[in-house]
Amino acid sequence: MGEAAWKGGVRMSTYTTIQGDAWDLISWKVYGEEKYMRYLIEANWGYSDVLVFSAGVVLNVPDLPEETEEDVPFWREDDNVSDEIEDDDEDEEDEDW
């Protein structure tokens, strides 16, 4: 990756494509997971219609935002919820006896 710079309050690095790069592959190369390719596309909207890149295209690579509540799966949002469910299950079992 290239040098880091600030753009619109977000720290950005750059990535220069090689022949055959695609959004998911670039995401895997720079972030370690394909699921973050949306951030690459948003930072490089002018290339959003490109599926397979030619060599030498310089793309902006934004830092990933910190994980927020909406990024967390619903089953990890609140650890106390599973405790409440278990308590309800125990109450139902007591009623059957």
Image (tube, rainbow, N blue to C red):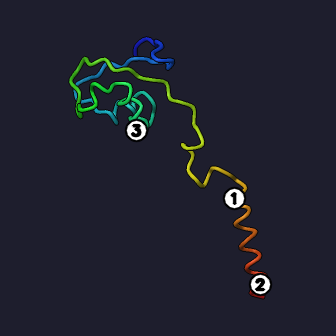
Q: Secondary structure at mark 3?
A: helix
**Which residue is identified by label 3?**
34
Pointers 1 and 3 in contact (C-beta within 8 Å): no
Occupied quadrant, residue 40 = top left
Sequence-first disc among 2 and 3: 3
Q: Is residue 90 shown above or below 80?
A: below
Pointers 2 and 3 in contact (C-beta within 8 Å): no
Sequence-first disc among 1 and 3: 3
Q: CA distance from mark 1 to mark 2?
A: 22 Å
Q: Secondary structure at mark 1?
A: helix
Quarter of the figure that contains the N terminus: top left
Measured from the top left, where is residue 44 in percent x and y?
34, 24
| Label at residue 81 | 1
- Viewer-nearest of discs 2 and 3: 2
Measured from the top left, where is residue 17 in percent x and y?
29, 22
Quarter of the figure that contains the C terminus: bottom right
Pointers 1 and 2 in contact (C-beta within 8 Å): no
Instruction: Give whichever of 37, 9 is nearer the camera.
Output: 9
| Label at residue 66 | none
Instruction: Give whichever of 96, 28 is nearer the camera.
Output: 96
**Which residue is identified by label 2?**
95
Occupied quadrant, residue 13 = top left
Q: Is residue 71 shown above or below 58?
A: below
Q: Is residue 9 shown above or below 72?
A: above
| Residue at the bottom extreme, as displayed | 97
Sequence-first disc among 1 and 2: 1
Measured from the top left, where is residue 56 in percent x and y?
25, 17
Q: CA distance from mark 2 to mark 3?
A: 48 Å
Residue located at (46% from left, 13% from top): 4
Instruction: Give whichever of 92, 15 is nearer the camera.
Output: 92
